[in-house]
Image (spheres, rainbow, N blue to C red):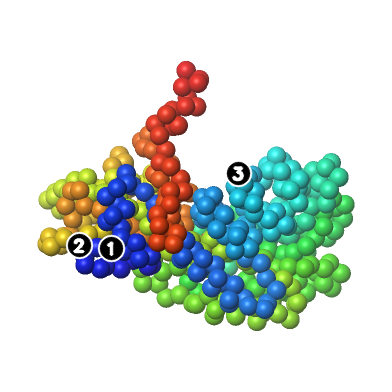
Amino acid sequence: MQTKYNDNILYFDDYNLLDVALINKTPFYLYSQNKIVENFKDYETAFSENNHLICYSVKANSNLKILSILAKLGSGFDIVSGGELHRVLEVGGDPSKIVFSGVGKTEDEIRLAISNDILCFNVESLEELKTINSLAIEMKKTANISIRVNPSIDIKTHPYIATGMKDNKFGVDEKEIVSFYEEAGLCEGLKITGIDFHIGSQITEISPYKEALEKVCKIIKKLSDKNIKIGHIDIGGGLGILYNDEKLPSKVDFVDSITNIIKPFGLKILIEPGRSIVGNAGLLISKVLYTKTTPTKNFAIVDAGMNDLIRPPLYNAYHNIKEVFKSGLKPLVYDVVGPVCESSDFLGKERLLCLSSGDFIAVENVGAYGYVLASNYNTRLKPAEFIIIDKKILLIREAETINQVLENEKTCL
Ligand SMILES: Cc1ncc(COP(=O)(O)O)c(C=O)c1O
């Protein structure tokens, strides 16, 4: 994370956070274009001459400005809904660089993707395969497909974000995969272009990728024996970021290990990173409303709640919290909590901070799975989003208004 103190004021990407907090309504998200670009370019450099395509995973942060920054860098996109496809098209993203993942694509979504000639559907079931085939035939088109393997890999991450384990709903069992491809080969509306897997998120080791790749490479050999040719391998996303004290491989080491295994097959490598592109490029700025001491705890009650950032209660995720201005107050150990009427509404527990009401805090590393998971719970309005570009602050989403929230219900009264 790019925050640092200068004269007790916290700076992010060289921008004075006290200035931005004092003049804008809190809470709000604040991103750094520099950091997003740097993260993307780190992948590009790591892949260097290897035939590859980075398909940024839109679900991590789907703000149009962020998508447009990535589209301009030449990024492809990994989408999981028609809505995300609309977003990518809106910013001029290239459809021929879009992969469509997810277990529950609807007919409307499939039609939209076929009509835009996307790069590939990552297919997750036989019924889905048949639906894509019949819709492609009906539309007199050919749909490119790859099949998502579930490699049954046990990974050390939160169980809610592990997706390549035996009991997960994702992908196709390794034992069935060859017959799936044979079935696909018989479908006149489909063209087999690749193979795909995604084993989970916030993965901090390379070994599960290697394990999955070994299995997938065996499948590729079996396919080749049956004369089923593929052109690419999509290794999904999932590389973790530093939230607390994790030990992480560098992007270079990660990419090198992957490319070394895949090289002999001469396939193009697709990768779908989300968190590792935007995660450490975002902050949530919030104001302390009240402090309160009970017989067992000190609470700092801030104006951002679980509706703004649900990762702490949902995944027990750790996010560093810093004072935007370090006053001379005596530090106390606080639970930093929001105004939502749930005991699970916390941003961080047992944090040593110098705080009093009216002070601002910065919650770090919230660029991924932050705003996109925000809700209107307790009829709270979703916050604004800003980005720092060339040392200037740009509003990239206005804060929601109460009229916007009530609109669809008022018309039904
Ligand atoms: C299919 C798929 N690809 C890519 C991603 C992005 O993962 P991450 O943000 O961990 O890189 C996800 C997220 O879970 C996913 O489900």
Disc number placed over residue 83 in the picture, else none: 3
Q: Is residue 123 visible?
A: no
Badge 2 is on which residue?
Answer: 326
- Amino acid tagged 1: Leu
Q: Circle 2: is it few (<14), some (14-19), or many (20+) Cα within 10 Å?
A: many
Q: Is residue 253 visible?
A: yes
Sequence-earlier tag: 3 or 2:
3
Disc number placed over residue 10 in the picture, else none: 1
Residue pushed farthest top? 413
- Amino acid tagged 2: Lys
Residue 234 position in % (x across, y down): 67, 66
Query: Looking at the image, which is closer to me, 142 or 89?
Result: 89
What residue is at 27 percent from the left and 56 percent from the top?
A: 18
Sequence-earlier tag: 2 or 1:
1
Label 1: which secondary element:
strand
What residue is at 35 percent from the left and 66 percent from the top?
A: 14
Residue 115 position in % (x across, y down): 76, 45
Label 2: which secondary element:
loop
